[in-house]
Amino acid sequence: MFRLGRRGFLLIVLSSAMATAESIYDQPYLGDSLANPPTRELASQIAAADLIIIGRTTKISEQSAGAGARLAATVTSVEVWKGTKPPGDLDLEWTPSATSLTAGSMHVLLIKHDPARLVLREMYVHVPPHDLMRAFGAMDGGKDASFRVIKALIRPKASRSGLADELKREVKAGGQRSQTAVRLAIELDASDSIPALTEIVSTRGDSYSDAAYALVRLAGVKGVRTLLDSLPATKSSDRVQETHAFAAIAAAGGRAAVPLVADFGRKQPRFRVSAAFALAKLGGKTARKQIETWIADPASSATERIFNGWTTHEPTRAELYRKALRMLRP
């Protein structure tokens, strides 16, 4: 008798989980893929902080590595962005965004008096001539753009001249600078964010799903148009961006998006199933009428490949349109 054993069982479970993760977006948007709003953790921490400084370490007294790593250091305040300058050096502890540090390292520190000093967030600033800092985990993003967004979040009414262009330049830089710029644009959550988010969506770049949701929420109908315009250039075999785009529109587009999605589905039949489920989430009589029209179309006899995490089946488009119709919001 064949015995699988603990190791073999774990391999099968892990393989199934990986297949699910890799395939979940390799199909049309089916209305059950939630577009979770990207978080604005940095903005929340800035609002909660009593003191925000650029600090230089004068002594690093303890440094651990691995999961749950912590760093204890004495810090001299070089520049104060929020709160009152401390009268002397600060003895602080934080979860570091960089390791193997030595005294003299520079950091942006968000500190709360709780009542002892608690570091809410630490962001390592690279040594010149590198114009980089780590605003989000271990990602090396543009220092100037990060500084400007942090200051804009501290003082929302201050001038933001040139900030939109700077974020867009960072997005075009690619790699971690681009990913950081998308996160900064989302944290900023303002009209200055739109050009950078539009660039990511239009070029189908990194962090597409977060950028898609944020763009629709901030730019409304124009954001919906940008998302839809970005889709025809995608390969028919690559449906990841299609799924993210329609999930974002369904979650943040509102009723104003209905005629745009309906028109797009009419003109672009290969996206029609995704459009139907987005229309169902957006809801209303116009959405219902359009889905019913697609059900009656002879082309609805074509099939779609659907993977539910365990099995694959190929329903007709008409079946999927009817499923969307059952989900329709009034």
Image (cartoon, rainbow, N blue to C red):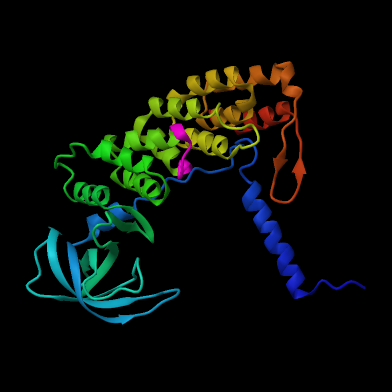
Residue 289 pos. (x, y %): 59, 18
Q: Residue at x 23, y 49 (%)?
A: 144
**From the viewer's perspective, is 48 left or right of 86?**
right
Residue 288 pos. (x, y %): 58, 22
Q: Is residue 207 magenta?
A: yes
**Closer to the camera, 142 or 198?**
142
Q: Is residue 193 magenta?
A: no
Q: Residue at x 18, y 44 (%)?
A: 156
**From the viewer's perspective, is 307 left or right of 209?**
right
Residue 213 vs 265, above or below: the answer is below
Residue 166 pos. (x, y %): 27, 40
Residue 235 vs 289, above or below: the answer is below
**Closer to the camera, 289 or 43?**
43
Res 267 → quadrant: top right
Q: Which residues are magenta?
A: 202-209
**From the viewer's perspective, is 250 left or right of 324?**
left
Q: Residue at x 23, y 55 (%)?
A: 47
**Closer to the camera, 322 or 80?**
80
As drawn, which residue projects farthest toward the right?
Answer: 1
Res 322 → quadrant: top right
